[in-house]
Image (tube, rainbow, N blue to C red):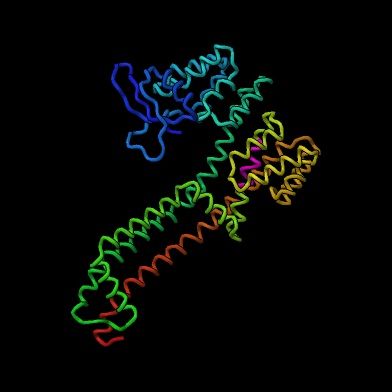
Amino acid sequence: MRFHVKQLDASMAVVDSVIDAANEAEARELIANSGGRLIELKAVHGLVPIAKTGRDFNLDVFNQQMHSLLEAGQTVVDAIEILGRNDRKAASRAVYDVLLRSLRSGKQLSDAMEGLPSIFPPLYIAMVRSSETTGTVRASIRRYQLYRQQLDTLRGKLRAAATYPAILLVVGFLVISFLMLYVLPRFSAVYDDVGTMRNGSAAFVQWWGTFVRNNQVVAWGGFATVTLALVVQVFHPVVRSAAFRRLLATPWVGERVWVLQLGRLYRTLGMLLHSGVSVLSALHMTRASLPQVMHGRIDEAARLISEGMPMSASLRDCGLGTEVAVRLLVAGESSGNLAQMMNHIADFYDQETAMWVDTAGRLIEPVLMLGIGLVVGAIVLMLYSPIFDLANIV
């Protein structure tokens, strides 16, 4: 959630800001530990005209520094105290102050992190909690760090593959809109003195140009509406969820997207099981990090496992694994090394996804360029077709 905060800073000046927090209690605790005196706190929704300050707390940097200090022999309390003193950002220091205060009151590190749910995800807290009983907090932090790096690597490949097609689509949409709303109406004005054209494309140029010139507010308003609708479809969570479900139903692309999500499923399960989290708890925590379309299958798999069915058979019956994954899971169950087998399955799925992304990228980019070129060429041809009519060429 986002909260509008009005507070007094150290110089007794009133400061308006917007921060992110999971709930009002967390927001109040962060403000109190940042040295400010709260005047007003109000939850906000949608776009806020006030500059967002956030907390600027980087969890990846925290993990890296925390692991280094613990590896050097520092205790958890000393490590967090050192990190808090070295952080120059007041908002980030507030996070360390909250952790220190909880630790010095006798709480475990996982309990202290649980008080900051917008910063520390449930997966991370569960790993730390399970490692506290065995004294392997440092190894758990390192394991989560590697997990984030693997996900970021795959996410980076997907983002890089989608960037150029997205740019092509945006530029193509703007170019086509410019031709239809600016160039074509002015070009068609040349033909008004000739009379009504009877050729199909020429008649359309004359009709469209006249309509845009006489109804500029309607034409540009329609362009703005279409642009806003496209932006909403890209960023609105409900629309994105519906688009994702439709994408999964697509024969070729849907299969690849499903494999990508299966890779995330097994990667997360393997990390949690390796940290000592039980199978059912790991499934419930993994469920929250995956798309909603997979929740029903995961719930059914958890029910089957709770009834005594092996994990390999449960995931197979719920459609959460290919034949290769099921065979590896059976081998992991028989050898007692299920977590490692899940990591192998995730590696297999990630490699398959990376190969598909490379192949799809080489195909999609020329297809998009060809499609945009054909549309632009058709518009240019429509612009010049009346000249051909006038010269009796056509």
Return the residue nearer the eye: 320 or 270: 320
Residue 49 x %, y %? 32, 37
In the figure, is residue 166 to the left or right of 282? Answer: left
Asked whether 260 falls inside the magenta stretch, the response is no
The residue at the point 49 percent across, 15 percent down is 81
**What range is drawn magenta here?**
261-270
383 vs 140, nearest the viewer: 383
Q: What residue is rendered at 72% in x and 40% in y? A: 302
Q: Residue at x 30, y 78 (%)?
A: 203
Q: Toward the viewer: 221 or 294?
A: 221
**In the picture, which quadrant includes the C terminus?**
bottom left
Q: Which is nearer the eye, 128 or 20?
A: 20
Q: Main secondary structure of the magenta part?
A: helix
Residue at the spot x=58%, y=34% of the render?
146
Furthest toward the top, the residue is 105
Instruction: Left or right? Give the position of 113 relative to 19.
Output: right
Residue 262 lies in the magenta stretch: yes
Q: Residue furthest left?
A: 193
Residue 370: which quarter of the image? bottom left
Residue 167 against residue 96 in the figure, above or below? below
